[in-house]
Image: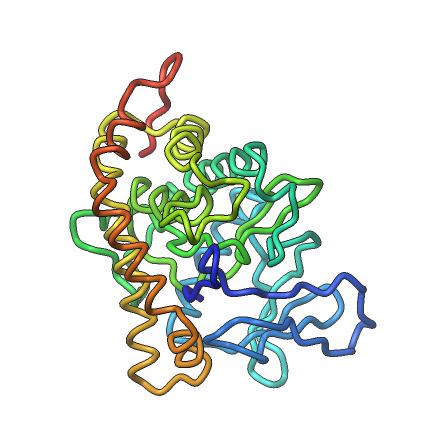
Amino acid sequence: MVARGPLFENVQRARMSAVPSDRAELPLAGGYTNAGRVIRVGDTVRRPQNATSEAVRALLGHLERTRFTGAPRFLGVDERGRETLSYIEGEAVLEPYPAWSLTDEALVSVALLMRRYHDAVSAFDPSPYAWPNAVPEPYRGELVTHNDPNLDNVIFSAGGAIALIDFDLASPGSAVWDIGCAARLWVPLRHESDVPRPLRGRSLARLRLFVDAYGVSPPDREQLADVLPLTHEWCYRIVRRAVAGGHETFERMWRDGGRIRAERTQSWLMTHADAIRAAVCRPASGAARSSG
């Protein structure tokens, strides 16, 4: 989901390294919306159905048909009514953050994974399906964006990003919107006190590295400074709605500093808008690829 931890605003999902027996159920610990209800069974993941299930199944089916390997496969519904997805072997970034996860190489690999996903999903028609979490109108198009490429929603192998998981917040958006979502979390873009020490003072340089690696088009670079605070606001609107609805784990996160961190990040993004624009708008070396 969209709640974040103290540094990267991430929801930790501890992925089990031991391979369970075919029928043993091992909870994948962490998470907020589905806390305790996402289960590994053998080489599958079982999770509750929700309002986005039909749309996400169609999306995952499209990605499978395009031979995109960076997302789970939908395998059906089990006898308890839970969605069954393929389990992707690998590692998510959890606190304490391993050194490899803070490298420029890891950041570039996330940008390349986002690009591959956008290329794969570009031919998918979202119109027949309900997408409850709409992004702001100016950034809402026909490209179904992930919208929550949080640290625990990206799977790594050998230090490189190989797959996206948890498409619950996916909806029609645009490349620049999803680039903003990913860059904000992975660079990361927030107040220095909330940035891991090895990355402090490098936010703008790493942002430029991310957009160059993706191949962001000049028009989208111009928009990025405006998009970033909107992605943050959108994300935390969902969190606030959950808190207002009495969701226990979201309430706990909010009380334990989540609200303060969210406000601090929003202020940082607004006050650094000009610096962000200057950092990314110089044309990349060589011909930049269009970001759709």
Q: Residue at x 50, y 55 (%)?
A: 61
Q: Quadrant of the C terminus?
A: top left
Q: Quadrant of residue 28?
A: bottom right
Q: Is residue 65 left or right of residue 88?
A: left
- At x 38% / y 58%, what residue is drawn? 170
Residue 85, x across and y down, in percent? 60, 65
Looking at the image, residue 285 lies above or below residue 144: above
Which quadrant of the view contains residue 4? bottom left
Which residue is situated farthest in the top direction here? 286
Count of number-bearing discs: 0
Residue that sits furthest to the right in the current view: 21
Where residue 84 sits: x, y (%)? Answer: 60, 70
Going by the image, does 195 lie left or right of 243?
Answer: right
- The structure residue drawn at horizontal position 72% and vertical position 65%, both measured from the top left corner, is 16
Where 10 sits versus 35, above or below? Answer: above
Q: How is the image coloured?
A: rainbow
**Horizontal relation, residue 141 to residue 24: left or right:** left
**Residue 164 image point, x, y percent:** 53, 51
Viewer-proximal residue among 256 and 277: 256
The reply, left or right, for residue 255 in relation to residue 160 is left
The one nearer the camera, 133 or 149, is 149
Instruction: Tell me the residue at 63%/39% (across/down).
Output: 160
Taking 236 as reference, is 141 above or below it? above
Which image quarter holds the N terminus? bottom left
Residue 168 placement (x, y as % from top left): 43, 65
Residue 84 in the image: above or below residue 161 = below
Residue 247 image-quadrant placement: bottom left
